Every structure is written in C-alpha cells, then in structure tokens.
Image: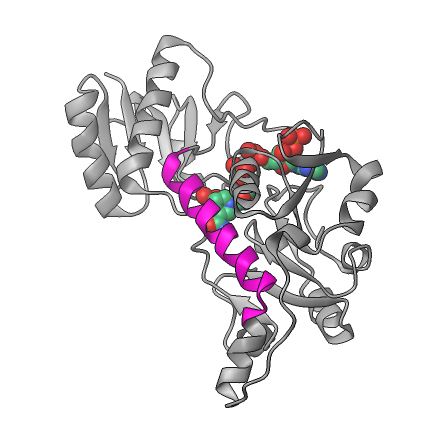
C-alpha cells in the first residue's frame, strides 16, 4: 500500500481526499492526524514541516509544497534523499498576475495619494502618464514573474526583467546576474519582487537597491517579507527616493499591532493574498505530479535543495 499524507487545512484535505478517491483510487490519501501505518506514507503534502512528524515517516520520498515558495518548509529536518516539489498551478498564477496588474496600475495612477486626499477631504490631482510611458521591472523570471510580465505587456507598460540567469522574454528587455542589476534598476519606475527567499536574496530590497532606482520610483513586494529591509524602506519613502510601496508579504505575518506599515500613507498593505493556491485547481497539479512520481518521470517544479528554490 502506498499512501500520501495531507497536513494543514482540514477542508482542503477532505476535498482532495474525495478527488483522489475518484481520479487516483490506487493511492491511499490520508489526512493528518489520521496517519494510519506510517511506513506506508511515501508522499507528504505540507505548507510547513513538523520535524516530529517527518521523523516518524521512515519511507518518505517526496514533500509536495502547498505553495509556490518553499522557504517556509524547514528543509533541514528532511533527510537529504527526500525530494521537494513546489506548487505550480493555474490558481496561484492567475491570482498573482491579477494582483501584480492591479498593484502596478494603482501605483502608476497614484492611488495611495488619492486615498489620502479622500480621507482628508481634499480634491487635488497629479499629472497622468500612459502605461506606455512607465517602465515596470520584475525581479525573478520564473513561473510567476514571466506570467506577470506577459500581462503587464498587454496592459501597455514598458517592461524589463532581471534574474540570476537572465533569459529571453518577448516584449521584455531581460538582464541577468549581479553585473547587470544596476542597469536594470536604473530603469525601474515600478519594481516588482518575485524572487524566492533564499540565503542569497534575503534582504535584497534594501537602501543600496532603492538608491539605484530612479528618484520617486515605487516598490511592489509580492514575494516574501524577508526580502525587505523594513527600516530602509521607511527611510527611502521619507527621503522621497521611493514614492509608494505595495506590500503583500511581511516578516512576521501578521505584523504586530502598531507597526508603522499599517498607517504609513505611502504604503498599501495586504495580508499575503496575492497568489492563492486554489483547492479546486491545485489538486489536479498535485495528481499529475504524483503520477509522475509513480512513473519515475521528472516532476513539474522540483526544487534544487542546494540552492533553495
Ligand atoms: P520560480 O519559478 O522558482 O522562479 C524564481 C526566479 O527567481 C527565477 O527566475 C530565478 O532565476 C530567480 N532567482 C532565484 N534566485 C535568484 C538570485 N539570487 N538572483 C537573481 N535571480 C534569482 O518561482 P515562482 O514560482 O515564480 O515564485 C516566486 C516566489 O513568489 C515564490 O518563491 C514565493 O516566495 C512567492 N510567492 C508569493 C505569493 C504571495 O501570495 N505573495 C504567492 C506565490 C508565490 P533563474 O531563472 O536564473 O533560476
Ligand atoms: C504563497 O505565498 C506561495 O508561496 O504559494
């Protein structure tokens, strides 16, 4: 008997159990804490890892992340042979693309400024540009960065992208590696962070980076709170180096009561809702990957554990 164990949201577990029963009855889908015979569990589905549970699963082969990111999984508690697969599914991609489009348009059209004006009963206005006169740069050209760029292009923005290896994207000028980061940043009027959080990218959204962007540029962070040096952002906003920031992620989440991000007029904060794993769509990506595991085929979205993404 081969089993897969779901942890986390019980409603999602119950739904996925029913879908597996229909589409993949040969797989015994179990929902924590009903783990049954632990020796039969070869696959684990999780958002975070419980080291005690992992230690009890002697035959664990693969961890499937509920999310696109894997930094929230403490990989140090996994034996080296256990493979890790991140979630690539249409629900996350579609919701992320919609959020990035909304955020870029909100900052492009000065919505944080108008929100303050409305609260203060004022009726002033700022100059208006076309999207075609605004450059949006995306850091991280993976699944979500590329999908976001395609939509930003369709909205009419000028787009540029940067990642470790660069690459080619139709309609987008791409830069690669630390040697080309300065050229990329120099053109970013709105910067979107869609990097994974790793030892290399932690704290990348810092004073040094903000100061290489044009004066009055804006930031959208939809990746992880750990990418951002909070005080550097507050300073950059105070100095006018940055105009606005739209933040969907923070560290910790939720931010503590009274944190300055809650009330800063130039910051729009949302509670980690940019890209959402949809129960109804993600289960099909999971089933496809479990079938690949059983057939010995390569996964979609396998993480290179040595580089952390
Ligand atoms: P992905 O497909 O793994 O793409 C990662 C990209 O980042 C790749 O282009 C990679 O470059 C680049 N990269 C990694 N390390 C780098 C470094 N040190 N310097 C420069 N570029 C680097 O990831 P994804 O699926 O697009 O997801 C990105 C992140 O979004 C996730 O890790 C997660 O943290 C976040 N996320 C947030 C939400 C939300 O709701 N806010 C939802 C989903 C995901 P190469 O191509 O050269 O390897
Ligand atoms: C959400 O943050 C994800 O990583 O999918």
Question: At 62% from the left edge and 42% from the top edge, which residue is drawn?
Answer: 195
Question: At 41% from the left edge and 42% from the top edge, which residue is drawn?
Answer: 94
Name the residue furthest bottom.
121
Compared to residue 16, the image places residue 124 above or below, namely below
In which image quadrant can residue 105 be found? Answer: bottom right
Q: In the image, residue 22 lies at what x, y percent?
A: 15, 24
In which image quadrant can residue 189 be found? Answer: bottom right
Q: Which secondary structure dominates the residues rendered in magenta?
A: helix
Quarter of the image that includes the N terminus: top left
Q: In the image, residue 55 lies at what x, y percent?
A: 42, 33
Q: In the image, residue 16 lies at what x, y percent?
A: 23, 35
Q: In the image, residue 127 lies at what x, y percent?
A: 65, 71
* 41 or 116: nearer the viewer: 116
Quarter of the image that includes the C terminus: top right
* 154 or 22: nearer the viewer: 154
Asked whether residue 216 is in view, the answer is yes
Is residue 287 magenta-colored? no
Compared to residue 188, the image places residue 28 above or below, namely above
Q: Number of marks in the image? A: 0
* 29 or 216: nearer the viewer: 216
Is residue 108 magenta-colored? yes
Question: At 50% from the left edge and 25% from the top edge, which residue is drawn?
Answer: 302
Compared to residue 289, the image places residue 224 above or below, namely below
Q: Indicate left or right for 217 with 154 as reference.
A: right
State the extent of the magenta-drawn residues as a range.
89-111
């Amino acid at each position: 008997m081969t089993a897969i164990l779901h942890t986390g949201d019980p409603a999602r577990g119950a739904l996925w159990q029913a879908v597996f029963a229909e589409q993949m009855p040969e797989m015994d889908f179990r929902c924590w804490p009903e783990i049954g015979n632990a020796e039969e569990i070869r696959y684990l589905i999780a958002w975070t890892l419980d080291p005690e549970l992992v230690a009890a699963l002697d035959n664990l082969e693969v961890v499937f992340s509920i999310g696109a990111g894997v930094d929230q999984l403490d990989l140090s508690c996994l034996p080296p042979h256990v493979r890790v697969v991140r979630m690539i599914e249409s629900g996350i991609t579609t919701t992320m693309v919609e959020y990035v489009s909304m955020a870029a348009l909100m900052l492009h059209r000065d919505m944080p400024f108008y929100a303050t004006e409305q609260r203060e009963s004022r009726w002033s206005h700022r100059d208006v540009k076309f999207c075609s006169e605004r450059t949006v740069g995306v850091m991280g050209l993976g699944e979500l960065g590329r999908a976001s760029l395609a939509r930003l292009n369709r909205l009419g923005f000028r787009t540029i992208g940067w990642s470790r290896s660069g690459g080619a994207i139709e309609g987008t000028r791409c830069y690669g590696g630390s040697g080309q980061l300065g050229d990329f940043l120099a053109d970013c009027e709105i910067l979107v962070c869609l990097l994974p959080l790793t030892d290399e990218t932690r704290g990348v959204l810092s004073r040094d980076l903000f100061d290489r962007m044009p004066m009055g540029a804006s930031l959208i962070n939809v990746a992880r709170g750990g990418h951002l040096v909070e005080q550097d952002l507050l300073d950059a906003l105070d100095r006018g180096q940055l105009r606005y920031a739209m933040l969907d992620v923070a560290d910790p989440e939720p931010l503590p009561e009274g944190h300055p991000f809650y009330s800063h007029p130039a910051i729009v904060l949302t509670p980690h809702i940019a890209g959402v794993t949809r129960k109804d769509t993600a289960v099909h990506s999971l089933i496809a990957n479990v079938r690949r595991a059983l057939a010995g085929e390569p996964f979609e979205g396998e993480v290179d554990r040595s580089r952390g993404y």
